[in-house]
Structures are given as C-alpha cells and as structure tokens.
C-alpha cells in the first residue's frame, strides 16, 4: 500500500489510477489512515528545514557519600551476576535479528539539477539520488545496518543540507549539520 500512496503523492498516477485510489481510500479505513499519515510526512518534506534545535542543559545534583550503598554491595553483586547469566542465556537462544533494513531516502528539491547523499552507512562515500519522473522529488533506496547513522544531502555537488524530515541533528566537523537516523526493525 505504501507504494500506491507514494505514487499518488508523487503525482505518478494517471486519472484512472487516481479514481481507483480514491475509491480504495473511501472503502478502507486503514488505507485512509496510512494515506493521511504519509501526506503529513510529505508536508514535512516540503516545509522549510528547522533552523535550530534548542539546547537543553541538565544540572547534576551533588550528593554526599551514602554508606547504605556499601552495605548492599554484596546483594547487588549477586543480583547482577544472576541477571548477567540470565541475559546471556536468553540472548544465546534467540534468533539473530537481521543486520540491515531497507530504507527509502527522499527529498523535495525543485531548484537543483543533482542530489547526492553521504553518511555513515555508506562509509561517507557519495551516492547519487534519482529524480522521480518529472517531479521535484529525488530518492534512493538503500539497505542500511541497524543502529544510529549520520548523513547529509549534497545539492548540485556543493551545498550540504540536513534531511528536513529528520529533526535529530548534530553539528559536523566542518560547520554543517548531519541528520541522525536510528534504523531499527
């Protein structure tokens, strides 16, 4: 269903396909909900990127040394050892999770001739996105490892921009920003 909704959003359907799409949206509540969710994401893609994210600072509370912790050290050590053995046993019998997931990177850029992506999941090698038809959308689909990844888009081989749909960002070593993506199954 994601593919049909994506084709509708990206204006890749002919008139007959659009009529069938709307009939399906009208009949199936789940399909309607999913379509609305993806349209909301599309609104984020087309919106201007977030300029800054406020920095939140937390203060550490200073506390005196607590002697009651020393008294319960033996109990904590025993519980910790038992927990570690149980975790090891559970992890050894569980199936291994897939090492990568399929992810679609998409960006709306009507004013450029070329869009590329680079990130930790490509070992910072640059990969080119493909333009979707005659739209201003650019995309690439990649298998990326589970975990946290940093990446950025490169417009016309010179301007680096963070992904406007990912709010988690961090400054890079060159004065720009990288998007931070948590890839999990």
Image (cartoon, grey):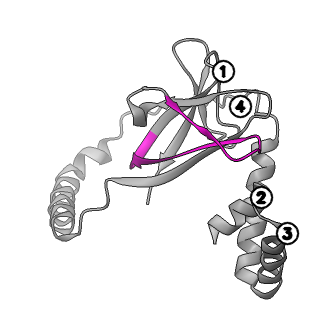
**Start and end of the magenta stretch?**
127-148
SS type, badge 2: helix
Q: Which residue extends farthest bottom?
A: 27
SS type, badge 3: helix
Q: Is residue 23 above or below residue 133?
A: below
Position in image of residue 83 (x %, y %): 21, 62
Horizontal arrangement in the rendering, residue 169 relative to residue 31 (left or right): left
Position in image of residue 155 (x %, y %): 66, 24
**In which image quadrant can residue 16 be found?**
bottom right
- Residue position for label 4: 53
Depth order, front residue of 43/93: 43
SS type, badge 4: loop
SS type, badge 1: loop
Depth order, front residue of 48/113: 113
Q: Residue at x 70, y 27 (%)?
A: 113
CA gap between label 2 and label 4 equals 29 Å
Q: On the rendered image, what quadrant is the N terminus found in? A: bottom right
Q: Residue at x 20, y 68 (%)?
A: 90
Q: Along the polypeptide, which appears first: circle 2 or circle 4? A: 2
CA gap between label 2 and label 3 equals 13 Å
Horizontal arrangement in the rendering, residue 11 relative to residue 101 (left or right): right
Q: Is residue 20 above or below residue 27?
A: above
- Residue position for label 2: 9
CA gap between label 1 and label 2 equals 25 Å
**Disc 4 to disc 1: CB gap under 8 Å:** no
- Residue position for label 3: 15
Density class for disc 2 (Cα within 10 Å; few <14, some 14-19, many ≥20) is some
Q: Along the polypeptide, which appears first: circle 1 or circle 2? A: 2
């Amino acid at each position: 269903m994601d593919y049909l909704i994506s084709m509708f959003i990206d204006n890749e359907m002919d008139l007959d396909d659009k009529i069938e799409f709307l009939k399906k949206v009208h009949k199936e509540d789940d399909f309607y909900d999913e379509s609305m969710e993806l349209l909301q994401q599309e609104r984020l893609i087309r919106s201007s990127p977030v300029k800054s994210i406020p920095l939140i600072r937390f203060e550490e509370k200073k506390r005196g040394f607590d002697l009651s912790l020393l008294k319960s050290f033996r109990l904590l050590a025993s519980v910790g050892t038992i927990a570690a053995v149980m975790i090891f046993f559970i992890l050894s019998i569980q199936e291994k999770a897939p090492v990568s997931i399929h992810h679609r990177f998409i960006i709306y850029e009507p004013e450029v001739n070329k869009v590329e992506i680079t990130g930790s999941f490509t070992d910072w090698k640059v990969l080119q996105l493909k333009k979707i038809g005659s739209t201003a959308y650019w995309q690439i689909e990649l298998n990326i490892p589970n975990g946290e990844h940093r990446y950025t888009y490169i417009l016309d081989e010179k301007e680096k921009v963070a992904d406007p749909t990912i709010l988690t960002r961090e400054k890079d070593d060159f004065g720009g920003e990288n998007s931070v993506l948590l890839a999990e199954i």
